[in-house]
Image (cartoon, grey):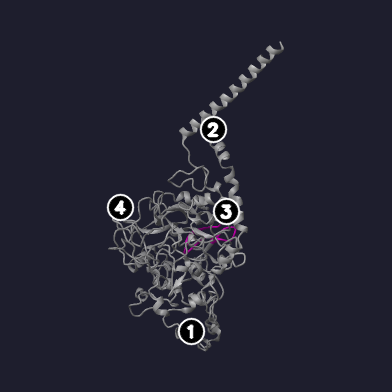
Amino acid sequence: MAGNWAGVWLRRTILALGLTAAATAPAVSQSAAATGGTETAALLSALAVPPSTADHSKFEELAGPFSDAAEVNQACLGCHNTGPEQLHGTVHFEWTWPPAPVRNMEAPGAELLAFFGALSTEDAEPSGMRHVANGFLLSTPSNLDACTSCHIAGTRFDDPAMFDASSEPVAPVDCLSCHEPTGQWTRANFHEGGAACSMCHDERLRGDTPEVEDLVAAAQSVGPSTLASCGSCHFQADGGPGVKHGDLNPDLINPPVALDVHMAAAPDGAGFTCSTCHTTTEHAISGSRYAGGPGDGPDRPALAGAAASCQGCHSATPHEDLASGARLDRHIDRVACETCHIPSIARGETQTRVLWDWSSVGKRGRDRKPMVQKDEDGRITYATEKGNLVAAGDVKPTLIWSNGRLAMHRPGEPLAEGSDPGESETEDLADLAMIEAAFAGTPWIASFEGDPTDEDSRIAPVKVMHSVVPVDAEDRRLAAVKFSGRSGDALWNRFDWEKAIDAGMEAANTPFSGDVAFARVRQMIPVNHMVAPASEALACQSCHVSDGLLANLPGGYLPGRDGYSWLDRAGLALLAAVLAGVILHGVLRLGFGFFNGRGRHG
């Protein structure tokens, strides 16, 4: 026991002596970065998307009157006549990412896609929201008519062929979805599409749905995309505000600089819109979780037509002007910029969902009608159509090794071992720490590859979503579920899982045994937004301690976190020997001095 205490004491003494400067330098450097550099501020402001060079309110073609959105779009295409040709085939239109190479593996689940590491693309399948499963609304193919209410075609459709520009009929394009600057058009159009309320709302709300009555005003207001127009879809993804992306929610429409230094309005922030980084070429918007990685460097500048990487603007030595810049820049090859500069997500008023338990749906109120339950803060913890729900704010991202290569499951693909289908109770999991402990070791349905030996890997932040999802009890294959519609096989009509999954698996062209079970799964979601001011970036002590943010991250030697017991013992023995020598030397000096002095003055 004494030896353990001494070892801890020794490590702390060495750390205190060796890192005294390191403890103070970051604070100085971060403060300098936060307050300095009018040149940098001017550069960042200059990169913001400029106003449109055309005043659309002056165009006679947009003077109306218009009876519906289709007439508005026809007026737009009178000038922008190549718009549909450009838009068709983009990721935003097709909801599809091209097939990625796969590697051959003999382990269980070898048939699953293993993205970006293969020797060929033979038999590879496309990715994107049309094809993959998730832990939120589970799958798109089984709910296509509801999901396409948020499609940029501006109209609902249930025929997958309408995504294909080479087939007939092809879905139209809706210019207002992206170019009406307030986002009100998209919200109104979504509600007019008639999708089930529960697709976005956990609670059935009263009152009128959003409307855009003046089509002429909407048409004449068009311009470059804005935070509000992009956010009308992306801030509401998979079930409501901030539900899916902890770093994307309506708080970013007009954020304070403390929430995001890039999207905050100038002069305090950079005044970025989404398209500042997600640049567009012929309506093809750059940037995807399937492309690029945390190691991408200055070869991906935003102005070259690629989604901006941090280093694309800030260079490979972003801290060179700071007092401790050289030491901080040594982290670049191992640590993604977001790791330090996004210390937490969902930092504003909107929380993000961290648990969704589908196994618990169907409980009704005393009046036999769908109900909701709320906590003391008024947040919904249970909804008849959604099950048990847990949201959290100011969430610290999970840090992983990532090379940007994302592996995802599809409906009908089997889960890896690690979760007993019978383990699904979540009612007592009230906070994130309890949830993480309960889901430890459960299978991933979406995860990034990477390890410390991979030169392309960096320590990067992700949000981890925890879900209890339906599976085929026979072989643990992920189930596709039909949620809504007028038929009796829709889950939200009769809460009959067997019928809802049978209809969903048929839509996904996947067999179903007829037996339903539930399994706990996890999903990684990349974190790239809500960049905090430099003064709020992580300090050295956040990671370089035994119980820091990297305490459970495998691989490598991390000063302050790792140690060698034999080296501690050797150092302690050396220190003890030196101390003993000093004491002995002092005693001898005193002794000889005493006796020599006594002899002289005898």
Left or right: residue 151 compared with residue 262: left
- The answer to whether residue 597 shows anywhere in this view is yes
Residue pointed to by mark 1:
72
Which residues make up the magenta segment?
373-393
For the residues labelled 1 and 2, say whether their Cβ atoms are less than 8 Å apart: no
* Mark 4 in CB contact with mark 1 (< 8 angstroms): no
Q: Label 4 vs label 1: CA separation? A: 53 Å
Q: Residues within 10 Å of mark 3 (few under 14, many from 20)?
A: some
- Earlier in the chain: of badge 1 and badge 3, it is 1
Q: Position of residue 63 (x, y in %)?
A: 53, 88
Residue 5: mark in rendering: 2
Q: Residue furthest top?
A: 602
Please report whichever mark, 2 or 3, sits nearer to the chain's N-terminal start: 2
Disc with the residue nearer the chain's start (1 vs 2): 2
Closer to the eye: label 4 or 2: 2
User: Which element type, helix, strand or loop, lies under badge 2?
Assistant: helix
What residue sits right under mark 3 in the picture? 322
> Considering only order in the chain, which callout, 1 or 4, is on the residue closer to the N terminus?
1
Circle 4 crowding by C-alpha within 10 Å: few under 14, some 14–19, many from 20 = few
Amino acid beneath label 3: Leu
- Residue bearing the label numbered 4: 108
Mark 4 residue type: Pro
Q: Position of residue 466 (x, y in %)?
A: 45, 56
**Alpha carbon distance from label 4 to label 2:** 46 Å
